[in-house]
Amino acid sequence: MRVVVLVSGSGSLLQALLDAVEDPNYPVRVVAVGADRTGTAGTERAERAGVPTFTCRLKDHSSRREWDRALAEECAAHQPDLVVSAGFMKLVGTDFLARFGGRYLNSHPALLPSFPGMRGVRDALEYGVRVTGCTLFVVDEGVDTGPILAQQAVEVLPDDDERTLHERIKAEERRTLVRTLERLAEHGWTVRGRKVSIGVTTN
Ligand code: GRF
């Protein structure tokens, strides 16, 4: 299964995948890594692993729609079966989803549908939940509303601050991403009743 990974930051989720794909039996190939800004640690990790990278910055395009189309083109050039947002801090638009709908996944650091949005870890902490976690889901037109593929619970400890809690959640996000992509590559997945297999979508 060919996967393009999108990053904005440190890329530790990406690194977990880059480590997993070193095993020739792991059924996933990271064919490219894209970023919405230059000089991310994520793209540096990709370069060290010999994976092609691209950058698609909003400010280099005349509108958000043009940026969205360009991002879809950049991804499509690598012929991915799946695109994964691993800490990619931008919402994609309708043109991107028209091309990759059902095949664009995001990892979120909370148990959706609780605590969607950019502050998932902080919001869970401030609410006072005793258990939070991570969610890997298929991106749709909403914000963190798409079909859920996998979740993992993480206990909130009495001394946690946003950083310590996020680090423990990210450890689970890494495991969840690696395991779930293996399962998707082998068995496909279902999005609202439609079975998605590599290269094939059926009712
Ligand atoms: C993860 O918690 C992801 O869910 C969130 O950003 C973080 C990315 O971490 N959206 P990293 O850049 O892979 O270390």
Image (tube, rainbow, N blue to C red):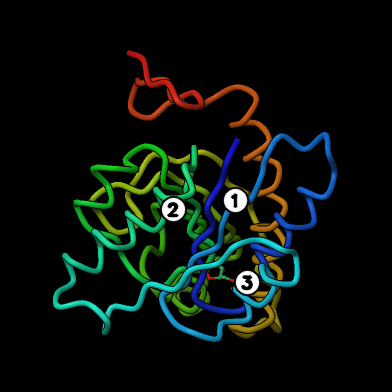
Of 141 and 94, nearer the camera is: 94
The residue indicated by pointer 3 is 11
Up-down relation of residue 184 to residue 127 (above or below): above
The residue indicated by pointer 1 is 31
Report the Cα–Cα distance between label 2 and label 3. 22 Å
Q: Position of residue 35 (x, y in %)?
A: 47, 72
Q: Residue at x 60, y 60 (%)?
A: 131
Q: Residue at x 58, y 83 (%)?
A: 162
Q: Amino acid at mark 1?
A: Val
For residue 157, what is the image quadrant? bottom right
Left or right of 85 in this view: 50: right
Up-down relation of residue 64 to residue 164 (above or below): above
User: Label 1: few (<14), some or many (≥20) within 10 Å?
Assistant: some
SS state under label 2: loop
Report the Cα–Cα distance between label 3 and label 1. 16 Å
Q: Residue at x 78, y 50 (%)?
A: 20
Contact, CB < 8 Å: mark 3 with mark 1? no
SS state under label 3: loop
Mark 1 vs mark 2, foreground winner is: 1
Q: Position of residue 193 (x, y in %)?
A: 35, 20
